[in-house]
Amino acid sequence: MENINHGAIDPEDSGRELAFVTVMGRDQKGIVAKVSTVLYKHKINIEDISQKVMRGNFVMIMMVDFKDSPSDLEDVKTDLAKVGEEMSLQIQIQHEALFKAMHRI
Amino acid sequence: MTLTVQEIFETVRMTLHQNFNIRTTTLGINLKDCIHSDFSKFCDQVYQRIRPAADRLVREAGKLEILYGVPIINKRISVTPVSLIMETHAEPAKFLEMAKTLERAAGDAGIDFIGGFGALVQKGMTRSDRALIESLPEVLSRTKRVCGFLNLGSTVAGLNLDAVIALGPILKEVAQKSGNGIGCAKFGAFVNAPEDNPFMAGAFHGVGEPDFSVNIGVSGPGVVRDVVAANTDCDLTELSEIIKRTVFKITRAGELIGRDLARRLEVPFGIVDISLASTTVAGDSVAAVLEAMGIEMVGAHGSTLALALLMDAVKKGGAMASANVGGLSGTFIPVSEDDRMTAAALEGALSMDKLEALTSVCSVGMDMFAVPGDTPPEKVSAIIADELSIGVINNKTTAVRIIIIPGAKSGDVVDYGGLLGKVPVMAVNKYSSADFIKRGGRMPSPVTSMRN
């Protein structure tokens, strides 16, 4: 596996409710705009963005804080999936605790 | 603390492309305090205990699937072994009534399987245990969701051959009464049955458990297969290390989600069961992991070593990741529910004898395999007795889930569809051990059990 620390993201902060929005697929215009629009609609704050080409695929990660979002995460998911379908991208939103549990002791 | 893009996408890929999921969240429920001398009141209390808890389990597990983006495939219930709570109502008809109550409570909550319709008979049978065993053909053919089990032996108690003898004709009757022997798929014959196993058909809420307890079964044979396939040149020690690291991650995710679920349900967290569990979904196969190691088809010479290595690495990775590893925590190699196991049985690569050998190293037992409908009951008992003796002597859980298919011959294939998959009917040894099995009694516990 590549051992690059490019785009390292720091999710350590107790006052926030953090999740990672991950996007995979073909690079194209408007990805950030459309994903950001969904997040803005649900009052989810983008804390950090990182993107790169990995194994020939475009990948993007947004670290977001959804503490102040009045929406159900299910609705956010549905809206992101719609963008994913329009642009042929795989878009996920997952709580950051999962990543911490799996990759840090 | 930092997370890299690679780490984040490793997790995303596991769930999107490698079938990583929480295989089951099983809520164990104590029913002992529901016992009542008035049987209909007793049934009402059982329903009232299970139904709201099951509703809550389904609701909260659904929320966690969304929060973590990890599918939770099954939400299930296990209860106190039913023979225990029925001691004062020990009649087969009442057992059927109780089974229907469990069926209704689970069904109304949208739960597909409820476990615990069984008895602990490792040393002997009470009147209630006998009535439960007698009721099994009716219960397993007339309910869809109720799963049964018997604990027929343990390393400390030995093997109760009298109960194994009783089970042979009972399973044949289950097969006759349920279409294509499907009722047999909902029953497991165990030794050293764990009291916190979250997996059906053998899940029950043990007598040493609290009122409620949440147990989690994680699974990811697809994830392990991919990591093994990506490392073709490493030796067995390195391979073990690679599997350990992967299983560590999977188990940590299971523990996180299990603890969160327990918190939301306001019940104690029980255990994480780290069993690799196959499903009929392509790529979700334990046999495929062995193939990725270099075994052409499971059953080939070398398969037992490959499985031993796999499970040992899984246990070590899991033990490092969670302080609460429990349940079966072996590997499941069901013949019907794992498409590469099915293929190996169909091709003749995997015989029943090799299946039994595989179960001696690390697996949970002979699972979801089919035998011809004309297999005599004492031969069914002998197959079960052989497998269970492996568990008793080696101080491990073993189990048998045998499907007897009426009218089927060796080489036939029966397609159950869905979760249960395709079942190839395997040849049984044509020679008899009836004179040995009919001796009955109890095989004494092994000398290794004397540890006090």
Image (cartoon, rainbow, N blue to C red):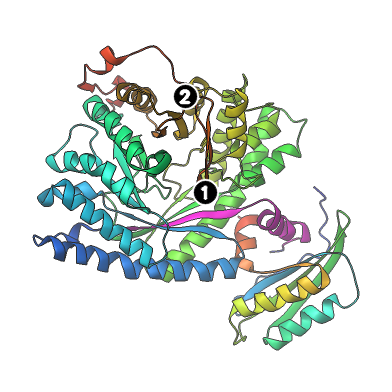
In the image, what residue type sits under mark 2?
A: Glu
Q: Is residue A16 visible?
A: no
Which part of the image, by quadrant, shows the C terminus of chain B?
top left
The subunit carrying tag 1 is B
Please say if B203 is above or below B2. Answer: above
Q: Residues within 10 Å of mark 2 (few under 14, many from 20)?
A: some
Residue in the image at 81% along x and 51% along y: A3
Residue located beneath label 2 in the image: B356
- In this picture, residue A13 sits left or right of residue B136: right
Write down the region rendered in magenta.
Answer: B3-28
Residue located beneath label 1 in the image: B419
Secondary structure under badge 1? helix
Residue in the image at 58% along x and 36% along y: B313
Q: Quadrant of residue B243?
A: top right
Q: Position of residue B11 (x, y in %)?
A: 68, 57
The subunit carrying tag 2 is B
Q: Position of residue B201 (x, y in %)?
A: 39, 45
Q: Position of residue B405 (x, y in %)?
A: 42, 33
**Are tags 1 and 2 found on a single chain?**
yes
